[in-house]
Image: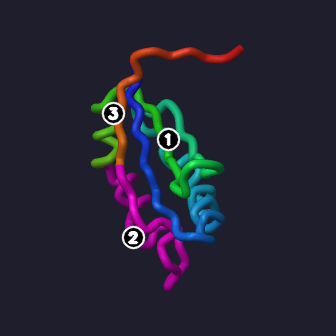
């Protein structure tokens, strides 16, 4: 079964649209990574102010290979996707990782 990684992003008040724009500018950047299966950027609605970046991979090894890749480094460099002098859209990050043990899809 798949390997799921959720990046929990602390986003300052008022910076959510900036974060979303920066992700939109890099849309599809991970799609060709070996083992990549799915990506979602989740905007908080209730219960938290944190954004979630959900990715699903064929295996933990595929995820780790992407994390060590040049493409990851370029996409996550300090100023990647932001104008010169602009502040980061997220001020904190933590990673949650899971193995999928049961799966169901809607019709």
Q: Which residue is mark 2?
A: 78
The percent coordinates of residue 50 (x first, y second) are 51, 55
Q: Residues within 10 Å of mark 1 (few under 14, many from 20)?
A: some
Q: Residues within 10 Å of mark 2 (few under 14, many from 20)?
A: few
From the viewer's side, name the closer residue of 44 and 59.
Answer: 44
Location of the N terminus (image quadrant): top left
For this view, does 57 lie left or right of residue 68?
right
The percent coordinates of residue 107 (x first, y second) are 71, 14
From the viewer's side, name the closer residue of 32 and 51.
Answer: 51
Q: Are marks 3 and 1 in contact (CB under 8 Å)?
A: no
Q: Earlier in the sequence, mark 2 or mark 3?
A: 3
Q: Which residue is mark 3?
A: 62
Image color mode: rainbow
For this view, does 58 lie left or right of residue 52?
left
**Residue 93 marker:** none
Marks 2, 1: nearer the viewer = 1
So how many labels did they put on this image?
3
The percent coordinates of residue 92 (x first, y second) are 40, 63
- Disc 1 is placed on an element classified as strand
Name the residue at 47% across, 38% down. 55
**Residue 54 marker:** 1
- Disc 3 is placed on an element classified as helix
Q: Are marks 2 and 1 in contact (CB under 8 Å)?
A: no
Instruction: Give the residues drawn in magenta, as a range.
Output: 69-94
Cα gap from disc 3 to disc 1, whole angstroms: 15 Å
Name the residue at 60% across, 51% down. 44
Residue 40 lies, with reference to residue 20, above or below; the image says above
From the viewer's side, name the closer residue of 81 and 20.
Answer: 20
């Amino acid at each position: 079964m798949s390997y799921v990684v959720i990046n929990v992003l602390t986003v300052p008040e008022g910076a959510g649209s900036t974060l979303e724009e920066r992700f939109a500018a890099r849309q599809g950047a991970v799609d060709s990574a070996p083992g990549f299966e799915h990506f979602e950027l989740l905007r908080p609605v209730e219960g938290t102010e944190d954004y979630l970046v959900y990715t699903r991979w064929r295996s933990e090894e595929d995820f780790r290979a992407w994390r060590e890749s040049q493409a990851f480094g370029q996409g996550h460099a300090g100023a990647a996707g932001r104008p010169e002098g602009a502040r980061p859209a997220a001020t904190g990050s933590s990673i949650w990782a899971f193995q999928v043990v049961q799966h169901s899809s809607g019709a």
